[in-house]
Image (cartoon, rainbow, N blue to C red):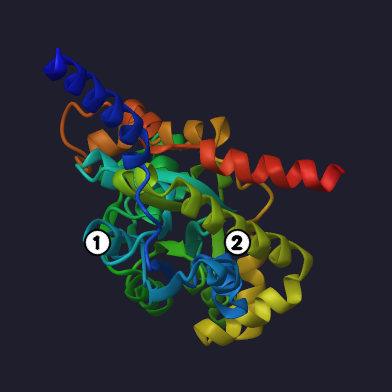
Amino acid sequence: MKKNALRVGLAALFAAWLPAAVHAAPPKEVRLDYAYYAPTSLVLKQQGLLEKALAPQGIAVKWTFSQGSNRSLEYLNGGSTDFASTAGLAAVLSRANGAPINTVYVASRPEWTALVVPKDSPVQSLADLKGKKVAATKGTDPFLFLLQSLQKAGLDKNDVEIVHLQHPDGRVALERGDVQAWAGLDPLMAASELQAGSRLLYRNRDFNSYSVLSVTETFAKQQPELIKQVIAAYEQARQWAIANPDALAQLLADEAKLPLEVAKLQLSRTDFSNPQPGAEHIKALKASAPILLDEQLVRPGTDVAQVVDQLIQPQLAAQVIGSNVAKAGN
């Protein structure tokens, strides 16, 4: 009888403890990256918005500079950071290839890639690219943009000669005449337009991935309140960016050591209006599924649509953004 009572008591104690165990105690430090391709991360860092928000809880903030999505995801998946700023498609590839991560926020929708030709190029349409050399960086947004663009014109990668170069080298190759086109990436693309007179041959915002914020699944389960605080700080940065476009351009120019006009051109192609992960975002990512499989950028047989559904977790952002909307309406 006593044993049964003890078992019941222990079971009740365990049941009461279990839900609390899912949410771990807040860490002493939260670790984020910042990047030139994620302008609101620069605002967040420069203005100390997150430091101010977390100081009452005694949580410190550590910043790590990221040069690109791949490096950002290496930091996240390697345990060096808690939040990763990346292209949405890079997050899909990471999840599809075994990294248990969740995208929790949309920082912006940049039109950061297009097909670029030299200023005096006779190439006037996608069809004119047939037989030409095109520079691109494999596995990146610009590379996938190139493949989708060719497909739209009834061509495929075998109809052009893709020259695999890193983004800066692609710009140099274009301006030197070593290739006839380049799948460009801002701010290099904006700089080439303004400094070398390069021309955007083909633009398609729908073929551009989003700029997103991701965390590991474990962190998402253990620290939902902290994630909401980070999202709230990002929301402050986003609102400031929308209200202060000139100051944002100057900040980007200063941080990335860019001419101001290059920063302004890059930002003119960046949409900060919809931070909520949702149907529009999911649809855009799922549209890339056939090319990801064809190019073997994900494992054969991968259900990319399912990967996207598992990746995108909009609930925490919805709570923060919905709360902000409600406050604004009062």
Can you give x and y, in whole percent of width and height, for residue 103 in the image? 43, 45
Question: Element type at marker 1?
Answer: loop
Relative to the observer, which residue lies in front, 152 or 1?
1
Counting from the top left corner in percent of width and height, residue 202 is at 54, 52
- Kindly tell me whether residue 233 is visible in this rendering: yes
**What residue do we see at 29% from left, 30% from top?**
13
* Residue occupying the point 40% across, 55% down: 142
Report the residue that reaches farthest toward the front.
2
Whether residues under marks 1 and 2 lie with C-beta atoms below 8 angstroms apart, the answer is no
Q: In the rendering, at what x and y percent does residue 129 appear?
A: 41, 51
Mark 1 and mark 2: Cα distance apart in space: 22 Å
Of 124 and 199, which appears nearest the observer?
Answer: 199
Q: In this view, does 186 lie to the left or right of 94?
A: right
Q: Find residue 2 and name its label.
A: none
**Which residue lies at the image location 49% right of the left edge and 57% below the top edge?**
113
Q: In which quarter of the image is residue 165?
A: bottom left
Q: What residue type is labelled 2?
A: Ala
Q: In the image, which disc is placed on residue 233?
A: 2
**Foreground pick, 93 / 117:** 93
Residue at the spot of label 1:
79
Which residue type does callout 1 highlight? Gly
Q: Residues within 10 Å of mark 2 (few under 14, many from 20)?
A: many
Provide the secondary structure element on which disc 2 rests.
helix
* Residue at the farthest top position: 1
141 in relation to 78, above or below:
above
- Tell me the quadrant of the picture where the N terminus can be found: top left
168 left or right of 113? left
Of the image marks 1 and 2, the number of the one nearer the N terminus: 1
- On-image quarter of the C terminus: top right
> Along the horizontal axis of the image, is 315 left or right of 149?
right
List x then y, in percent, for residue 148.
41, 41
